[in-house]
Image: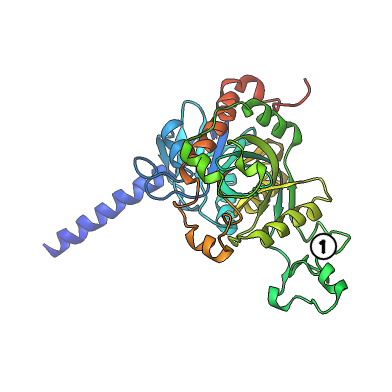
Amino acid sequence: MRLFCVLLLLATAGSAFAQVSNAAATPAKPIEIKVVVIAMFEQGADTGDAPGEYQYWVEREHLDTVLGFPQGYHDLRLNAQTGVLGLLTGVGTARAASSVMALGLDPRFDLTHAYFLVAGIGGMDPAAGSLASAVWNDWVVDGDIGYEIDAREIPHATEAERKLWTTGYVPLRKSVPYEQPLDLGETPVYQLNPALVEWAFQTTKDVALPESPELKALRMEFAGDMAHRPPMVMKGAKLSASTFWHGELMNTWAENWVKYATAGRGTYAICGMEDTGTLQSLTWLARAGRVDIGRVLVLRTASNYDVPKIGVSAAESIAQTKLGHYTAFVPSLETAYRVGHVVVDSIVANWSVDRERIPGRAK
């Protein structure tokens, strides 16, 4: 009896191993992928419960085929008819970079003509736009790499020091904030393909976005004319940092840091976490001939503002800012799909052209 149980256990384990192996098996010919949709987090299951960034894409783009992906954060999901592949990276720069690199090196897929759409939520600068708005990122700037001293130790004894030390954040290999010249070798800065970004913006700028009396009332609790406007589709720069920062002073730093890092060419609009990791991996994969870096889009939608409501302190505000309880959490998820899927569906529908020629390029 004991021998029978051992044999049964081995047979069961072998069957389970075969299922995993088959799920990750390399096909005779790699699957050509048209669009990779990249989301960063999901609250529970991929379908049927409270949504995160991934769920609307899985359900509405019919990403029904599950492919094992043990080298990454989460199993992949594919629509075999449309060639749209879903990747869930996990939260944070390290997870995003690792998952994207693992996908790029996966022999099951041909990604050489694939477009990549990062679709996630973020914290909006109220001077740039409003809750549930969509931002096509023209620049993505790293906000992690640098020196930092505690704000309570910032030099402030003289007028000159107070003018110079507006933040405790100092570029790597520099001595004071915003010291020139900028060293791009130390501060990762990514400019997305301007023609493709403009095409995505023009294609989606009139998409109807979520709006309600409740959302309008929420907007009025924040300062600024732009913050009070209905949701909109726009272009703007994104600050990518793994620390969830918050408050008026940090917002001013973000605005100034993006101007510094882009030599005045980018205007800060929204913040989030993972995208410098994603773009770093895609950049190196492009160098290896695995992907085309000119086919990458980053779409971030405003789930909250990066500053408190009028009359609320930064500490009080961040205590209320939890995943699933952001000011416009569900509307921002809806915006990401409504805007993003227009681009995805257009590429799929026009694949005979877009496979060879990136939209927005002169014919």
**SS of the residue at dot 1?**
loop
Give the left or right position of residue 12, taking residue 57 as reference: left
Against 265, is 212 above or below?
A: above
Against 175, is 309 above or below?
A: above
- Residue at (52, 55) in percent of width and height: 91
Closer-to-camera residue (39/216): 216
- Residue at (41, 40) in percent of width and height: 66
Give percent across and percent down for residue 120: 55, 45
Give the left or right position of residue 29, taking residue 56 as reference: right
Residue 178 lies in quadrant: bottom right
Give percent across and percent down for residue 90: 50, 53
Give the left or right position of residue 30, taking residue 201 as reference: left
Q: Amino acid at mark 1?
A: Tyr
- Residue at (50, 45) in percent of width and height: 328
Residue 70 visible in rendering: yes
Closer-to-camera residue (105/86): 86
Exactly how many numbered labels are in the figure? 1
Against 228, is 361 above or below?
A: above
Give percent across and percent down for residue 99: 55, 51
- Residue at (88, 60) in percent of width and height: 181
Give the left or right position of residue 191, taking residue 131 as reference: right
Closer-to-camera residue (64/58): 58
Residue labelled with disc 1 = 178
